[in-house]
Image (tube, coloured by chain):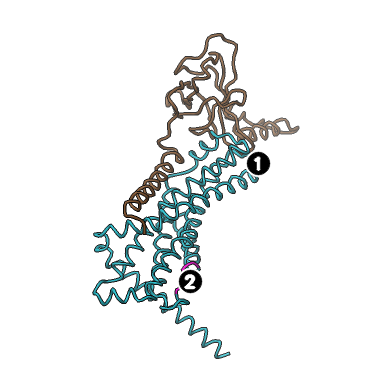
Chain colours: A cyan, B brown
């Protein structure tokens, strides 16, 4: 009994320690942020790595999420004889929830793991130690551009995802099932407010910060072994997904 | 690692695509900055009550969408709602004694304007007002009318209920 309790306390302390380390890491990033912005070249490269390279998977998933929404929404709404609300239902659920959340999960799986594995491998092959010896700050040179690249790419990915999904839902609802294309768009227009779009973009930005931070933190602090890199990659996906969903609830509650 | 030029080009493309998506969302999904094609003409109609009609709602004839509601204003002199419709140029020959009614699509559906053709040979001109406009049926006024009428016809009811304020 006592050992179980002790273990519980122990693991809770480890958890607190990790949170503290993460916050310290984030603060260090924030402090060197202005100097990092002066050097846009590596940031552009990372926007390419995290954003442009994720484009295909984001667009494919967006299309299918939209098509599923069109199918499910149509099936549900015809029961009430109001399938002209399909556009409204799709747009609002995408803008507020599905767009940011699914993009963040995909982002964690596609870009977050890549970041964590890359940084973990740099740690394992002593590249980071070599930089420190040469008096080059690896936080500034390696970590910050990767973090910023993710933060910049996320809101853009979210909006691309949403627009592609809207056309996916239109494909199913309007082209396959024959919902009037005018009602689809006009009902959407009359119901969607600018604040819905703002909510989606704010969520995208916050999730981008969270997922990128977790990815670079886990990669940078990975154990310098092959196993450590693997573990860092796994942890990135798991923690990113959990944190995204928790943050999603908090953000929704604060913005509704 | 690919050459920097390729990276720059695809990054630029990605960022442009992202901003294009944001622009699309702001202008096309919300009800601001949305415009119809120019090959159309306007009709207006004045209603006592438009119910839940919104801008962008379809205007249809025999169930076929021929245009959209462009603008809804309240006229302080007539105490009526002035609805401006944009009709596609394909449907130029609407008789100038056609009337407009507000209908509801489905049970909970959005409202739309239905035009019923008249018998005149002369078509409506651009900007002309529809002669007869039938108001939206408001469920509450229907229910209250029914309730008051049934109370009035009940035997033994001493004072007849006043006529409902909303007329059809």
Magenta stretch: give its range: A229-237
Labels 1 and 2 within one chain: yes
Q: What is the number of callouts on the image? A: 2
User: What is the x, y in percent for residue A53?
Assistant: 43, 55
Q: Quadrant of the N terminus of chain A?
A: bottom right
Q: Which residue position is annotated with label 1?
A: A78
Q: Of helix, strand and loop, which one carries label 1?
A: helix
Q: Which residue position is annotated with label 2?
A: A235
Please tell me whether residue A50 is drawn above or below residue B116 in the rendered image: below
Please tell me whether residue A91 is drawn above or below residue A117 in the rendered image: above
Tell me which chain the residue with mark 1 is part of: A
Image quadrant where residue A33 sits:
bottom left
Please tell me whether residue B112 is drawn above or below residue B7 in the rendered image: above
Q: Residue at x 55, y 34 (%)?
A: A181
Q: Of helix, strand and loop, which one carries label 2?
A: helix
Task: For label 1, count other residues whose C-alpha is less than 10 Å away and answer few (under 14), some (14-19) or many (20+).
Answer: some
In three-dimensional space, the C-alpha distance between marks 1 and 2, rounded to whole angstroms, equals: 43 Å
User: What is the x, y in percent for residue B166?
Assistant: 58, 29
Q: Nearer the viewer, residue A213 or A54?
A: A54
Please tell me whether residue A169 is drawn above or below residue B87 in the rendered image: below
């Amino acid at each position: 009994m006592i050992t179980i309790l002790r273990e519980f306390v122990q693991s809770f302390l480890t958890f607190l320690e990790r949170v503290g380390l993460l916050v310290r890491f984030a603060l260090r990033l924030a402090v060197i942020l202005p100097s990092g912005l002066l050097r846009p070249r590596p940031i552009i490269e990372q926007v390419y790595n995290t954003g442009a390279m994720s484009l295909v998977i984001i667009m494919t998933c967006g299309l299918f999420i939209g098509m599923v929404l069109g199918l499910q929404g149509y099936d549900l709404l015809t029961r009430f004889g109001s399938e002209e609300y399909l556009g409204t239902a799709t747009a609002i659920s995408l803008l507020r929830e599905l767009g940011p959340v699914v993009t963040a999960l995909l982002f964690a799986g596609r870009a977050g793991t890549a970041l964590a594995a890359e940084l973990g491998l740099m740690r394992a092959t002593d590249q980071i130690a070599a930089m420190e010896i040469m008096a080059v700050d690896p936080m500034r040179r390696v970590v910050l551009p990767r973090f910023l690249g993710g933060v910049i790419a996320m809101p853009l990915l979210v909006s691309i995802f949403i627009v592609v999904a809207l056309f996916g839902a239109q494909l199913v609802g309007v082209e396959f099932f024959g919902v009037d294309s005018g009602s689809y768009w006009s009902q959407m227009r009359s119901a969607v407010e600018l604040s819905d779009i703002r909510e989606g973009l704010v969520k995208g930005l916050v999730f981008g910060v969270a997922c990128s931070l977790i990815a670079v933190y886990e990669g940078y602090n990975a154990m310098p072994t092959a196993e450590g890199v693997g573990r860092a990659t796994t942890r990135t996906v798991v923690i990113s997904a959990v944190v995204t969903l928790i943050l999603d609830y908090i953000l929704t509650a604060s913005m509704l | 690692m690919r050459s920097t030029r390729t990276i720059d080009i695809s990054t630029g493309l990605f960022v442009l695509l992202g901003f294009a998506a944001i622009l699309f969302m702001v202008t096309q999904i919300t009800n601001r900055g949305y415009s119809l094609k120019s090959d159309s003409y306007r009709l207006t109609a004045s209603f006592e009550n438009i119910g839940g009609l919104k801008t962008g709602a379809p205007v249809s004839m025999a169930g076929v969408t021929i245009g959209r509601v462009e603008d809804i204003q309240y006229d302080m002199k007539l105490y009526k709602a002035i609805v401006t419709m944009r009709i596609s140029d394909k449907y130029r020959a609407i008789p100038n004694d056609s009337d407009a009614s507000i209908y509801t699509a489905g049970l909970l559906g959005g409202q739309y304007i239905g035009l019923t053709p008249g018998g005149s040979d002369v078509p409506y001109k651009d900007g002309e007002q529809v002669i007869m406009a039938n108001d939206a049926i408001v469920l509450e006024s229907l229910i209250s009318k029914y309730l008051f009428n049934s109370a009035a016809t009940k035997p033994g009811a001493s004072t007849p209920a006043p006529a409902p304020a909303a007329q059809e």
